[in-house]
């Protein structure tokens, strides 16, 4: 049991040191790899669609709460 714990701690230590090493050495490579060209793409594309589905979700939850209240009233009667 203690060996498993020791192995886990060593793995975490190794992963942390590897992550710090990667941050120190691979930072320039990472920033170059993450650059994207989004010319001509609207950041608001799909906002209306998202808003529509958010409204539908809200209506569903309101109806669910209303139905639950109605069911509670029927169970009490």
Image (cartoon, rainbow, N blue to C red):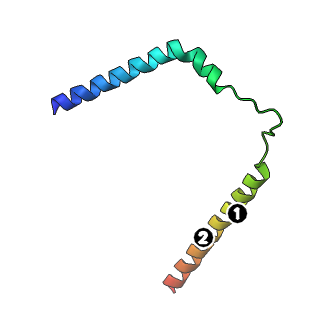
Residue corresponding to mark 2: 64
- Horizontal side of 35 relative to 17 (left or right) equals right
Quarter placement of the N terminus: top left
Name which residue lies at 54% across and 84% down: 74
Q: Is residue 14 above or below residue 47?
A: above
Is 40 left, or right, of 76 in this rendering? right
Q: Position of residue 47 (x, y in %)?
A: 77, 48
Residue under label 1, please give it: 56
Residue visible at 31% across and 25% down in the picture:
11
Q: State which mark lies toward you, 1 or 2.
A: 1
Using the numbered discs, state the Cα–Cα distance from disc 1 to disc 2 in whole angstroms. 12 Å
Front position in the image: 22 or 44: 22
The percent coordinates of residue 9 (x first, y second) are: 28, 25
Query: How many C-alpha atoms fall within 10 Å of the one at disc 2: few (<14), some, or many (≥20)?
Result: few
In the image, what residue occupies the spot 56% across and 16% down? 27
User: Could you tell which of marks 1 and 2 lies nearer the N-terminus?
Assistant: 1
Instruction: Tell me: residue 22, above or below residue 52.
Output: above
């Amino acid at each position: 049991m203690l060996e498993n714990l020791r192995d886990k701690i060593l793995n975490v230590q190794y992963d942390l040191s590897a992550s710090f090493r990667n941050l120190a050495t691979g930072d320039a490579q990472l920033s170059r790899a993450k650059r994207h060209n989004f010319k001509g793409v609207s950041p608001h594309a799909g906002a209306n669609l998202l808003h529509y589905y958010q409204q539908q979700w809200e209506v569903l939850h309101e109806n669910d709460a209303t139905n639950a209240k109605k069911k509670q009233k029927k169970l009490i009667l």
